[in-house]
Amino acid sequence: MITKTFIKEIKEMVRDGRVKLSFLIVIILLGVTLWIRIGHYQNINEQYKNATITEREVWNGQGEKNPHSAAHFGTYAFKPKYPLSLIDQGVDKYVGISIFLEAHKRNESQFSAAADQTGLGRFGDLSPDFILLFIIPLLIILLGFNSFTKEREMGTLKLLKSLGINNWKWMIGKWISLFFPIFIISSVLFLTSGILLFNLNDFGIFNWSSLLWLFLIYICYYIVFINIVLFVSIKAKKSGISLVILLSIWIISCLAAPKAASNIAESKYHYPTKQEFNTMIMKDKRNGLDGHNPWSKQAILLEKKVLKEYGVDSLNQLPFNFTAYRTQIGEEHEAEVYFKHYKYLREQYNQQTNIYKSLAIISPYLPTRFLSMAISNTDYATHWDFSDSAENYRIKTQKFLNDNTAQNTKFGERGYKAKADFWKKLPAFNYNPPKLNNILIQNKSNLIILGAWIIFSFGLFLFNSKKI
Amino acid sequence: MLKYNFKYELKFLLRSRWIQLLYIILLIVFGFSVFNGKQKVDKIKNTIVAAEKQVKENDIMMLKLIDSIEQGYKVSVPRWTVPTNPMAIGNYHPRVAAMKPLQLSFISTGQADLYTSYIKPTVSADDYALNFTEMTSPIQLLFGSFDLAFVIVYLIPLLIIAFSFNVFSSEKERGSLRLIASQPIQINIWLLQKLGLRFFWLSIIFISTITIILLIVSSEIFLQPRIYITLLALTLAYMFFWFVLAFIINIWVGSSANNAVALIGLWIIFVLLVPSVLNQLGNTIYPMPSRTLMINEMRAKKLEVTEKQDEILDNFLRDHPEYATNDPSQTTGFYHRYIASQKLIKEEMKPLVNTFENQLKNQQNLTRSLKWISPALIMQESLNKLAGNSTEDYENYRIQVINFAETWREYLNTFLFNNLDFSTNDYINLPKFEMIRDKFSVTSAILTLLLISISLLLPGLVFLNKDFYFDE
């Protein structure tokens, strides 16, 4: 029964012009988007490489210079692009591509691609994730909305019943015949992108297991949709009604719920505006040690403390340059201030994440989207990770520079310049994105939610077998 | 016949609970979206007010300090923040350059979540590095906002589709079409009346729900009825387009299911595909230069100028004699060299920075010339414009801020290069920023929507033979 139903359904699909057309459109779209993305990916990667090298050359070529001037001159950390961004570009477009690392200040990443786009960019990009997340579920709806209603409308339901068929087997046959084409189309896409990525010259840290996980996540997402589509098709009296209901489910789950979630998250746990954020940091900075201001209260306290520690009575007798030491301590204080405020931001974001998770109850799209971005290294968490490691590098750089001044100069000495070859000694910035295992552990709850969706939707579908 | 149709339709819509359902759905989605929009706009307004208040408070402190210095007292602030120094004013007492929300800003988030609503440009900041982006969670930017524009552009067409996909086919499927055909009325006229009545009822429901919601959430809008009427007219024109589409599909295609598939297909094309294809087209034809390479270039220039600062200052003073002081006893300091170098970098970077602006303009022009392909696009653009949150608005704001930053710098540079102190008398002359909005009108958008609709409707009415419907 299962095979017979399967063969009959597939035959019907192959004969149906509507199905052929929509399949063709999806395949063309996937091909085009993949092609566009590959060009984009290669382009960005090349720019990243050049930019990193050139920036390092600029840093190394500073010549003789005071280390603190070099600290203000600063350096840039550039964000690399990862292979799976080819499939899901996630939030990459909305976060900056570079962070300016300078003395006293933690800067936000700058120059997001979205800021350089017209308003059209907000409708969404033509990329594989758009097809995978939005269009393929629609394709499932299109293929399956009348799976059961048509039997009713054509009167074949009565014939089938009179044959005494096993409802279960019949339903499983229908299920497989809907799953099969979707499975094929996704496999082809993932395999093609895998092969393409594998053959790119610098495919970075591409590994097949990430791709496999991504594939599995999408298959799970589609299974949820298949179950829902067939469930509605069983329940609805007419094909048209079934289609309209399914479309409403699709729009709620893929468009409305994410938007509503983002609004609720924003109104409950909102981010400060950039200016507010800066003002809060300024306030905290002012209350602590200012490395440039020897007359501030904190600076005088530090002076006393250091003099006591070394058992000397003037700053001249210290074995290092106190001014540079104070700059470094001030730097550490500022780093702490930034740490505190960014921690707050992160807490807000974690709270927002919980809202997204709770709305995943009405939308299988949400857990899928988050998992897909996370595995592709294009999610917000990866950006946080990058920004944190750039900040750590900044703090280390400041210490490296201030220590040099402290060791090579005396108190009160002005106009010190480090040698031209000194800059090369600073280790280069190197960022490694989170590993697949860690990503999966971090996204455990999303995996659980998606799993729950599968169980729930299978339950809905299969426990209706008697009601046909 | 129209009278019978009217009566029948009303009874049918009431008994099938369509009217009640639409009322509830629209009240909920309008309420939620308008409330969200209002909340966002209030947040923006409050931050601008807070920023202006803070500047005012700081100004009072600053004036007190200057006054003390002018009276010959010693002040206990770090040397570089003493406000008689024009550079201290320029860096530590910047003005608020704000883009204040408009009356209708709550209807569409547009680009308001992406860009910041105010900026305080300082004398030492680089114009091309002025960060105009807002600190928003990128997840929010990715998902977008549940605003009124989303409801109107995305959801209302779907409601219309659900409301009208089977108007004709269901009669056919139930067999009542033959009965109607025996009446003295042309089928396409009958269908037109039926859909026209549905358009009428949906319009009534739309107007009444939106008015209720606006009265509750944002009643001040009724003080300017023109804005309110524009919003209604625009939305009705858009709704009209979808009804016309439903009419065409109803007579053209066959069964209810096929009608629904066709209409949904059109919805996907107009709302999802055309915008992203046009976006891709714009990016491909007018690609943005690389920001990373821009940074590289800027850095190389900065390194170059730090090495030759004195030379640059000399050249600068030769080119700008108005800044050169005639008093040989006065010296030039860090800021003289810095400002001169900054100016040089800015001039040299200009061609590259301009390419970004030009490409964006080119992309915008391309969109503008092609947006009639999708009424959803026309609608979204017009709503963004009404809200004052469109890309053009922010582009306009950006240019004005950069000009203001220049004015601010120029004003204080005159003090710097003439080695003059900033005094309490100069305070009232400090440049102020006031954003000037472009004039706009959505009349052309409304007309375009109507034109598209009518050019679809006429062939539907004229060329389709009524026998066509009965070849079952």
Image (cartoon, coloured by chain):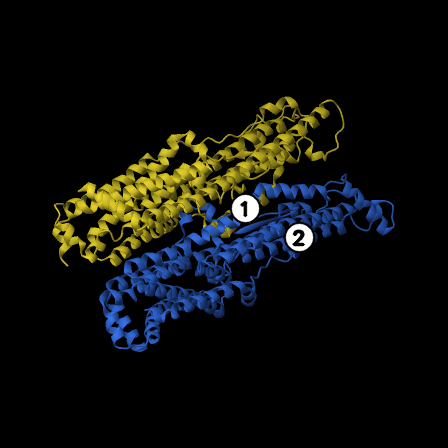
Chain colours: A blue, B yellow
The x and y percentages for residue A232 are 35, 63
Q: Quadrant of residue A241?
A: bottom left
Residue type at mark 1 is Met
Q: Is residue B398 left or right of residue A146?
A: right
How far from the left and from the top, in percent, is residue A330?
A: 72, 47
Tell me if A242 is positioned left or right of A311 in this view: left
The percent coordinates of residue B124 (x first, y second) are: 60, 37
Chain letter for the residue marked with disc 2 in the picture: A
Residue at the disc numbered 1: B135
The answer to whether one can see residue A93 in this image is yes
| Helix, strand or loop under label 2 | helix
Question: What's the residue at 55%, 61% (across, down)?
Answer: A433
Where is residue B113 shown, x and y percent of the image? Answer: 49, 44
Q: Which residue is mark 2?
A: A395
Contact (CB < 8 A) between labels 2 and 1?
no
Q: Which mark is residue B30?
A: none
A211 or B330: nearer the viewer: A211
Q: Is residue B226 above or below residue A338?
A: above
Element class at badge 1: loop
